[in-house]
Image (spheres, rainbow, N blue to C red):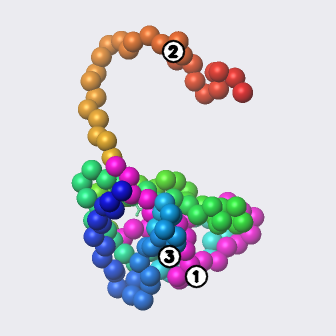
Amino acid sequence: MTPIRIAIRRLSHGDGLPLPAYATDGAAGMDVVAAEDIALAPGARHAVATGFAIAIPAGYEVQVRPRSGLALKHGVTCLNTPGTIDSDYRGEVKVILANLGDAPFAIARGDRIAQLVPAPVQHATLDEVTALDDTARGAGGFGSTGR
Ligand SMILES: O=c1ccn([C@H]2C[C@H](O)[C@@H](COP(=O)(O)OP(=O)(O)OP(=O)(O)O)O2)c(=O)[nH]1
Ligand SMILES: [Mg+2]
């Protein structure tokens, strides 16, 4: 598939850092590095600077996803996963990391902390009605079909 083109602007505090990049040819996400040093205490969260801003083409978003290694080994994940970067956002991309582990976790500038995955966005229009069609499920949810 032809890659979509995303304009990226390096911010002054991103000087010298690698831009997001695919670690392997088949990687789904571009790894993003931290632009700051931060110590995350257990239970703490922080919007980690990345040092860049992007302009996503209309009709797309970029999802900010955790790295499984950080999650499994340290309990460090994106709190709002998947984070949403809107196509009209021009501010700095930030990675909202949370430490759900039981030990402090140190992030150093240049560490890979998350990955970016572009995705198409489908807008909907809502048609307000007074009754919805019947289905076998009806209002059952939240485990209604059993374990
Ligand atoms: O992980 C994230 C999530 C969001 N953002 C930025 C880009 C996104 O376009 C904007 C708004 O995100 P979102 O819509 O998820 O947050 P909100 O709480 O609804 O804020 P807003 O009222 O600004 O839309 O914040 C990030 O940099 N990283
Ligand atoms: Mg929003």
Instruction: Report the residue marked by disc 3.
Output: 33
Instruction: Report the residue marked by disc 1.
Output: 108
Residue drawn at point x = 53 percent, y = 12 percent: 136
**Badge 1 vs badge 3, beta-carbon distance below 8 Å:** no
Q: Residue furthest right?
A: 102
Distance CA(mark 1)–CA(mark 3):
9 Å
- Residue 112 is covered by the magenta coloring: yes
Q: Is residue 81 above or below residue 33?
A: above
Residue drawn at point x = 52 percent, y = 70 percent: 24
Q: Is residue 3 above or below residue 121?
A: below
Q: Residue furthest bottom?
A: 16
Q: Secondary structure at mark 2?
A: loop
Q: Is residue 104 above or below residue 71?
A: below
Q: Position of residue 52 (x, y in %)?
A: 37, 75
The range drawn in magenta is: 92-120
Nearest the camera: 143 or 67? 67
Instruction: Report the residue marked by disc 2.
Output: 138
Using the rendered image of the protein, determine whether residue 129 is visible from the camera's viewpoint. Answer: yes
The amino acid type, in three-letter code, at marker 1 is Ala
Distance CA(mark 3)–CA(mark 2):
45 Å
Q: Is residue 77 left or right of residue 42?
A: left
The amino acid type, in three-letter code, at marker 3 is Val
Q: Position of residue 145 (x, y in %)?
A: 65, 21
Of the numbered discs 1 and 3, the one sitting upstream in the chain is 3
Please state which of the two labelled residues, at mark 1 or mark 3, is closer to the viewer. Answer: 3
Quadrant of the drawing holding the C terminus: top right
